[in-house]
Each structure stands twice: as C-alpha cells, then as structure tokens.
Image: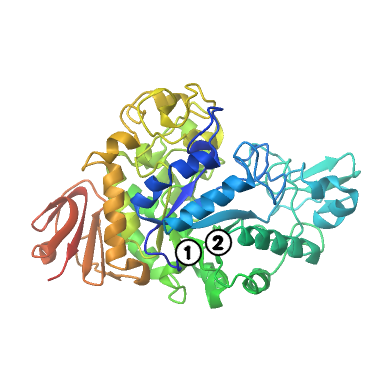
C-alpha cells in the first residue's frame, strides 16, 4: 500500500518504541511489542506513526546518540522485525516516519572511530574556539561545546552532549552519506523522515568551512531522495519563528515543519486566559505555507521549550504551569507532562489541537492523559512508559519492576489504576474516546486542507473561534462561562460545557451550520 498522502486526514502518532510495549519480558519495549499494539494506533485515527530513534545506541540521549545509522538496536529486535512493522502499518493504512539524525552521531559511531573518516566528517580544532554565540544546547549539563579526543589529538565540537560530536554538513561526503542512509531506509519501506535539529545542523560552528545554507541543503536533499523515492515525506524539527517556516516548506522543500511558535503561543494564551494571543499568532502565520506544512503539538517528550517567547511571556507560563523550581529545565522550559500541567484544561486543549490549522501530532499515551514523575531527573520525568492496563508492569511488560517504568506511574491521580488504555477503551467519556472522536471529526470536515477563519467577535477575550467548511469550533481558554449567542442555533457535533449559546469555563464546542 502506498504512503498516505500529505497532509494526512488523520493524526501523526509519535512512539518511543522502548517505552511502548515490551514483548519479551526484558523491561524494554521492542518492535514485536509495537506490532502487537498497532490496532490501538489505527483505531485512534492515525494516518502516520513517527518512531523515535531505533538505531543502535547507548540511549544516553534517548537514542539520538546514534552508534550506527543503518541498523536496529538489538534490544528493539531485528531488521526483519522492522520490516514486519512496516508491512503491518501499510496493511492498516498507516505510513511510517523515522528520525534522520543529521546533526551529530555518538562518539562510538564507526565514522568517529575511523582515523581517516573522522577528520573530514566532524568539526575539529587544535584548541577550543570561543564564541559568545556558541552555547551548549543543554546549559548546566555541559559547560562547553568542545571536548578533547585523545586518539585524534584534537578538540571536536558538540552542540549537544560531549558524547555527540557534530557532523560537518558542509562536506559533500557527509551529505552523500546522509542521502545514502535515507535511501537505504526508504528502500526498506519507510515513507518519511523527521529531520532532527533541522536548523541547528545548518548553523556554522566557530571554525571555517562549517554550516550550510538551509535552502540549498534541503533542496539538494529533496532532489536526491526524490530521484528514487518521489513520494517520501520530509518533516523538519525547527524551533524557528513563523516567518522562517516558509524557508523550509517553499517549493516542496519539506512537507511540514514542527510549529514551535504556535505551540508557545498556545501556552501563553492558556496562561493568560487570552485567546487574542493565539489569534495574533494565527494571523502571523505565513500564508505561503500550506495548511499541511505545519505539524502542531502540545507536548513532545522533551522539556516544553519556550524559546519563542520573550522573558516576560515565559515568566507568565512558568508561573501558571511550573510554579515550583523542580519543574524547570535549562532555563527555557518545563519538564511536566501535558495532562498534569494543564489539569482541568487538558480536554479543551486536546480539542484545540485538532481544531488548529495544520496537522495534529500526539505522542504515545497523551490520548489517555498520561502523567509524569518529577522525582526523576531531567527530561526523563516526562517520559513514562505506556499505561495499557492496571496490572503489574502496567501492561507494558511482564516485568513488574521494568527500569523504564517511572515510580509515579504506580500511584496518584495519573497512576495506572486511574489512567490506562484498557479501561478508557470501554468508557465513552474517556480521554481516549475523545481523541478518537476528534480525529474523526477533523477527518470528516477535511480540516487538513483548510486554514480556518478567525471569528474574533464570538465570545470575547477568552474564546478562540475558528470556522472551516461550515464547522465552527469554540474554545474557552478562561475559567468563567462566556455567552456566544451568535452560535446558539448551530448543531453541536461534539462539545463539553456548551449549553445553547453559553460556553462554560475551559469548555469547547464543535458546531455545524445548517
């Protein structure tokens, strides 16, 4: 079955395979486990799955410390297992996207260990080159962007962790290798790639002969890959202002870009109970970018990165959703999960995600309202395993004390006894049911093709009103009821807190015109 067209009518579902389903009882999720759970993903209304890195790795950076771009980590299974997942996805109408990590490798990669290859594929200096604009990606964890390699007798650059030397994307041999690797996985049935750190990879490092013009680089990448696989989808992770998204999507350069700016505006609007903040950001979107050129999300499995906000705006979000010091990370974000962070606003924000122009992305477990565990250090606090059922191992593993299970997953308001897929599947009022209903509504209304028209006169300051194809969506970002008499006669398709023209606090409504 061919890849689903882009933009998809359904959602994109992100999966950390290590935390999704363990099939062999070793406490580590794997491809056979994923295979057994694909019906859950398809029933949710997904068109695509995005697999976080499955490459061999020590997983010191959740798999982005790649040891080998061409294989599957043996803990996940084999290449035959991967082929079985791809075939099963295609049989269900699901397309498969994987990460293409172009910014760096691990220091264990064959390229870095080979004396001939490392000199041309990475970035070196005889001594660290200081540059005030050259800051570590994770302040407080690595104090420098340079590390000394004894074997090479020189210093290598790393924007991320010290065990992740940066590739020099300005070198043709690096570019050619990346094309070869992507083509290899496309030959294996992969339908698309998420380009990790798409813009940081292009940024020149503080030595000559590094960096690349993103337009030129991604045009070349598209042309080279399209020569054999013209239907491949390319999606970029690019934390950039909306004005720069067009640079990456023009002329089909990329099919879509993860929209951090809309994500940040959403959190600021929620923190201030001010729909005008989000409306202004929607007005700011580049009209040249197709609707499907934006992949919208509320939370990924990193910290909530608020780089697109000013210091004052970021402080407002911190005050609303991260009032305790242990909730912050890197001075720019929050390490809380979606459901506990937004609490009684969670279901409204879930609906809002599906109503916004663009393609919705949710990560595994977010359809349940899965939680976090702030007793765990760093980003892993918001990386729980999937909560399938209320039993030892959470239905994720037969190993009750699987090391990836967070301590907090066994208790509390978001523990497995209260939040699990088995129970929610039978509950018409569950988060899981709501997610599937929203996905169907979005698909039936063909919102993947439409940008929506803002209705600022509907509901006042706290209500975001968007209309597309005869569907009016209302989302009350504030805690108080609001009168929306203009919509009183419309037919409710899906609503919470809606009563004949009154929208309750943090309520939402999908309404159809006659």
Q: Which mark is residue 50?
A: none
Query: What residue is rendered at 45% in x and 48% in y?
Result: 314
Instruction: From the viewer's perspective, tell me whether residue 275 is left or right of residue 25.
Output: left
Asked if 221 appears above or below 503 in the picture, the reply is: below
Q: Residue 115: x, y in percent?
A: 90, 49
Q: Residue at x 55, y 61 (%)?
A: 192
| Quadrant housing residue 266 | bottom left
Q: Position of residue 182 (x, y in %)?
A: 66, 60
Q: Residue at x 24, y 49 (%)?
A: 478
> Residue 296: percent from the left, percent from the top?
42, 58
Left or right: 197 with respect to 22?
Answer: right
Q: Secondary structure at mark 1?
A: loop
Along the line of sight, the residue nearer the viewer: 450 or 474: 450
**In-front residue for pair 59/422:** 422
Secondary structure under tag 2 reads: strand
Q: State yes or no: discs 1 and 2 in contact (Cβ < 8 Å).
A: no
3D distance between C-alphas at marks 1 and 2: 14 Å
Per the image, the residue denoted by label 1 is 1
Q: Quadrant of residue 448?
A: bottom left
- Based on the displayed image, in which of its 4 quarters is residue 487 positioned? bottom left
Q: Residues within 10 Å of mark 2 (few under 14, many from 20)?
A: many
Q: Give the position of the C terminus as an image quadrant.
A: bottom left
Disc 2 marks which residue?
A: 192
214 w.r.t. 502: above or below: below
User: Looking at the image, is mark 1 or mark 2 nearer the viewer?
Assistant: 1
Relative height, residue 345 to residue 190 (above, below): above
User: Which one is earlier in the sequence, the residue at label 1 or at label 2?
Assistant: 1
């Amino acid at each position: 079955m061919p890849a689903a067209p882009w933009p998809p009518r359904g959602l994109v579902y992100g999966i950390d395979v290590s935390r999704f389903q363990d099939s062999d009882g070793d406490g580590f999720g794997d491809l056979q486990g994923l295979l057994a759970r694909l019906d859950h993903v398809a029933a949710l209304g997904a068109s695509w799955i995005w697999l976080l890195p499955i490459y061999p790795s020590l997983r010191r950076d959740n798999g982005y410390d790649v040891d080998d771009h061409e294989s599957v980590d043996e803990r996940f299974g084999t290449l035959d297992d991967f082929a079985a997942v791809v075939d099963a996805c295609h049989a269900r109408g699901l397309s498969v996207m994987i990460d293409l990590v172009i910014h760096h490798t691990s220091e264990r990669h064959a390229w870095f260990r080979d004396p001939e290859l490392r000199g041309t594929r990475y970035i070196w200096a005889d001594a660290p080159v200081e540059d005030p604009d050259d800051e570590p990606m994770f302040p407080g964890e690595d104090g420098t962007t340079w590390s000394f390699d004894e074997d090479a007798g020189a210093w290598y650059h790393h924007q991320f962790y010290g065990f992740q030397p940066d590739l020099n994307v300005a070198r043709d041999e690096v570019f050619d290798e990346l094309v070869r690797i992507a083509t290899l996985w496309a030959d294996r049935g992969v339908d698309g790639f998420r380009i990790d750190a798409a813009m940081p990879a292009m940024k020149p490092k503080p030595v000559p002969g590094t960096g690349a013009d993103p337009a030129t680089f991604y045009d070349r990448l598209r042309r080279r890959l399209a020569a054999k696989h013209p239907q491949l989808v390319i999606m970029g992770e690019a934390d950039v202002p909306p004005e720069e998204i067009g640079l990456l999507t023009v002329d089909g350069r990329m099919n879509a870009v993860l929209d951090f700016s809309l994500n940040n505006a959403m959190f600021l609007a929620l923190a201030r109970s001010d729909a005008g903040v989000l409306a202004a950001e929607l007005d700011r979107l580049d009209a040249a970018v197709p609707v499907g050129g934006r992949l919208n999300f509320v939370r990924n499995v990193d910290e909530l990165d608020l780089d697109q906000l000013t210091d004052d705006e970021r402080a407002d979000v911190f005050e609303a959703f991260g009032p305790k010091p242990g909730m912050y990370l890197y001075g720019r974000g929050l390490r809380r999960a979606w459901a506990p962070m937004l609490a009684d606003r969670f279901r409204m924000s879930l609906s809002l995600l599906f109503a916004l122009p663009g393609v919705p992305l949710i990560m595994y477990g977010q359809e349940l309202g899965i939680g976090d565990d702030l007793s765990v250090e760093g980003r892993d606090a918001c990386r729980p395993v999937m909560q399938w059922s209320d039993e030892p191992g959470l239905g994720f593993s037969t190993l009750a004390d699987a090391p990836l299970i967070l301590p907090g997953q066994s208790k509390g308001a978001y523990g497995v006894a209260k939040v699990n897929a088995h129970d929610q599947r039978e509950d018409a009022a569950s988060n899981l049911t709501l997610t599937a209903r929203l996905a169907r509504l979005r698909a039936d209304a063909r919102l993947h093709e439409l940008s929506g028209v803002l209705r600022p006169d509907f509901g006042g300051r706290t209500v975001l009103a968007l209309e597309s194809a005869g569907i009016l969506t209302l989302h009350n970002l504030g805690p108080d009821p609001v009168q929306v008499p203009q919509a009183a006669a419309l037919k409710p398709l899906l609503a919470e807190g809606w009563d004949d023209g009154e929208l309750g606090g943090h309520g939402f409504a999908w309404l159809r015109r006659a």
